[in-house]
Amino acid sequence: MASPAIDVVIPVHGGWQLTRRCLEHLAAQTAGHTVTVVDNASPDGTLARLRAEFPDVRVLEMGVNAGFARAVNRGVAGGTGDVVVLLNNDVECEPEFLARLTAPFDDPAIGSAAGLLLRPGGERVDAFGIATDATLACFVRHQGGRSEAVGAGGTPPLLGPHGAAAAYRRRALEAIGGFDERIFFYGEDLDVALRLRAAGWRTVAVADARAIHLGGATAGKRSAWQREHGGFGRGYLLRRYGILRSRAGLRALATEAIVVAGDLAISRDTAALRGRRAGWLAASGCARRAVPAEASRSPVGFVESLRRRVTDYDLEGG
């Protein structure tokens, strides 16, 4: 079967040096592809530099910082490739990354694929896709593990790709309506993974599709901004998927109370709580979404869930 046409979409808001390195690594890829950089009103001259140094890259201007989901949807709509690969600008791909990440799409049942993101130096895993517990709390898989020990399987089970380096079948992504633009940042990749799985699409982890993720270089780990937007995504998805009215409702309330109280004690602000409240209100009136069986049957227990939210790089930001 012929290789799929590949669109690479990179949303950016500043960080020109990171973007340049990302594009330099993409230029060395063995698989043909088209790159679209979607600029969320970068304050550092990114647009002019892109046009001067990378004239073959398609550039789309948002005009304002419209958030990750809106930028991704704009970038996806601007292309025609069979497979869409999303990259953060702080990801540096090995030359075979795109070829290996998109190879599983020969199977028509595959809707998404997760590459192996490594920490600088390549010895430790940053993320190998995402997983959830029964309350839809999101975790990166294999974080901190040794890269040579990672295979395609492992626990917790893969739900979908990490948004920093994710491949999607265009037809599948369009069928579910793309990314939810109510979520500005954090939680949007989880939401897409849930909707794809609920729609019957399979996902796969590709251990030999490797890239270095500088991690936190764009947003800054555990900043108030990050924790508030992460809290928004958490509150929004709890309501959108009806978790508090489900069998996992009491567990969700207990874990959120513990997490928010811990964040308050550590950070001395209410960013995580404010975000959750805003997200909950934003989901008012929205149609409830189905929780796929893979998520509702998650083997991650209460204690393990809390441990992961303390020790992992928490995708929901607090």
Image: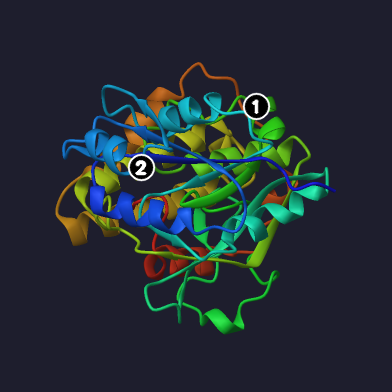
Q: Is residue 110 left or right of residue 131?
A: right
In the rendered image, residue 230, in percent from the top left (x then y), is placed at: 36, 44
Mark 1 or 2, nearer chain start = 2
Q: Residues within 10 Å of mark 2 (few under 14, many from 20)?
A: some
Say left or right for 278 vs 300. left
- Residue 158 visible in the shown view: no
Q: Which mark is residue 229?
A: none
The amino acid marked with disc number 2 is Phe
The residue sitting at 51% across, 68% down in the picture is: 303
Q: Secondary structure at mark 1?
A: helix
The answer to the question of whether label 1 and label 2 lie on touching residues, with beta carbons closer than 8 A, is no
In the picture shown, does residue 247 fall above or below 65? below
Residue for badge 2: 54
Q: Secondary structure at mark 2?
A: loop
Q: Nearer the viewer, residue 238 or 207?
A: 207
Residue 308 lies, in percent from the top left, at 46, 67
Question: At label 1, which amino acid type do we have?
Answer: Glu
Residue 174: mark in rendering: 1
Q: Is residue 302 left or right of residue 236?
A: right
Asked which quadrant contains residue 58, the reply is top left
Q: Position of residue 200 (x, y in %)?
A: 78, 39
Name which residue lies at 45% across and 82% down.
123
Q: What residue is shown at x 83% (from left), y 49% (from top)?
A: 107
Q: Nearer the viewer, mark 1 or mark 2?
A: 2
